[in-house]
Image (cartoon, rainbow, N blue to C red):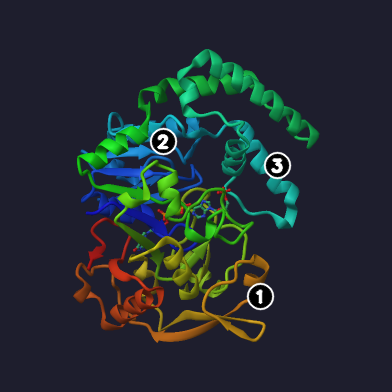
Amino acid sequence: MPNTILVGAQWGDEGKGKIIDFLTDEADVVVRSQGGNNAGHTIVIGGEKYVLHLIPSGILRRSKTCVIGNGVVLDPVALVGEIDGLRARGVKVGKNLLISDCAHLVLPYHQALDGLRESLKGNRKIGTTKRGIGPAYADKVSRTGLRTGDLLRTGEFEAKLKDRIRENNAVLKSLGAPLLNAKKIVADTLKASETLLPFITNTVVFLHRALETKSRILFEGAQGTFLDIDHGTYPFVTSSNTTAGGACTGSGVPPHRIDTVMGVVKAYTTRVGEGPFTTEDDSLGDRFHAMGREFGATTGRARRCGWFDAVSTRYAAILNGIDQIAITNLDGLDGLESIKLCVAYRLDGKVLDFPPTDSADLAKCEPVYIEMPGWMKSTEKARRFADLPPKARAYVRKLAELTGAKLSIVSIGPARAQTIRL
Ligand code: GDP
Ligand code: IMO
Ligand code: MG
């Protein structure tokens, strides 16, 4: 497998974790390069379900190295919880995990501010995961952040952390919020750091050596294209570059070492949190929720659901340079007689081929649908493309054609085996 960036081409939760786990079989190194534990990546192996938030989804395969790159924001206490949880289930987490010494830390004041700012926004809220992601990236850009590398110098770190807590407590006070307990935060962070220290290193040098020895590198995107801080439905986005370019800046791997970009899409669309969603259809959401599908892997919130939106996936393809597409959750459409597919938007009497960049304009867009006949048969047991009903094959081919990418993978269930490689 060539060096591959895997990105979500919708609003997150496309099934990236499942596809990464599948592709890791052919890779040597799996890298997370942005986001934090706002991500929730689900993998099902032999009936066992794992949800990963910070650790790359490659961790479940033996003899693979997983890297948390410099672009990730990392909650040390949450990461230790994740490591312990995996170890308790017999998953090896040791020399197979490396953490960049330049990754920024997410600390309790980031979470407090995230929650507080959301509640102050009232009905203009973003609907964040409240994991402190936005405030942590804001500190990074303001050059007031603390990094994993700082944990290596305990005395200095403690003094810096106390300073940051003091400053943030002043902000919290001015907003009428309860103050944070500095002693507890310092103690909890230093305790977590005892577990994390052996993993912390210069991952740029590691990745450079991996490239020199022709190791195959897989970049695991978190969130999705339309949650990108620059290109997403601002301000209803996350705080990192979720698009393909973020994989390079967030890992220190140069762009010319990337061979291919794979986009992951659901066979329909979902979104969690607020913001415009042109193809949203509550009846589709009701149907999925009644089937027990489409509840968030991180917050448990019911996801908003709608039809496949080829206008946005086409835009995702040009933004990310997507040349291959993986379509997941095709089985979700198994029982439908007819399936809608959005091929253009209509805004103020004009037909648009690409989404407008302004969220207020996007919210005014009307979807232009075509309809395709459903296949009314279970696809879950298909193992080869030819096993799929002809109408299901026609549907996924159409999604790939409208997006402008080669159809590479079709997923028809959460399990590893329910994956068709074309
Ligand atoms: P990620 O954040 O992109 O990794 O996606 P999530 O794990 O948050 O959400 C995807 C959900 O769909 C998870 O519950 C997966 O187990 C599930 N999933 C992935 N692919 C398929 C599929 O083809 N069919 C079904 N039924 N579930 C799938
Ligand atoms: P994965 O990697 C879906 C959404 C939140 C909210 C917005 C901002 O599992 O696909 P944040 O906490 O990041 O400041 O929230 O982004 N969001 C996600 N939605 N999947 C995710 O990750 C998400 N990570 C953040 O719901 O709308
Ligand atoms: Mg998810």
Q: CA distance from mark 1 to mark 3?
A: 30 Å
Residue 316 point in image, percent of width and height: 46, 65
Q: Nearer the viewer, mark 1 or mark 3?
A: 1
Is residue 266 in view? Answer: yes
Q: Horizontal placement of 176 versus 317: left or right?
A: right
- Location of the C terminus (image quadrant): bottom left
Residue occupied by mark 3: 116
Is residue 181 in view? Answer: no
Amino acid carrying label 2: it is Glu
Quadrant in the picture for residue 4: bottom left
Nearest the eye: 34 or 60:
34
Classify 10 Å Cα crowding around label 3: few (below 14), some (14-19), many (20 and above): some
Residue 388 point in image, percent of width and height: 25, 76
Up/down of 407 relative to 15, above or below: below
Lower position in the chain sequence, tag 1 or tag 2: 2
Q: CA distance from mark 1 to mark 2?
A: 41 Å
Residue occupied by mark 1: 364
Up/down of 356 relative to 238, above or below: below
Residue 116 point in image, percent of width and height: 70, 42
Up/down of 81 relative to 162, above or below: below
Amino acid carrying label 3: it is Leu
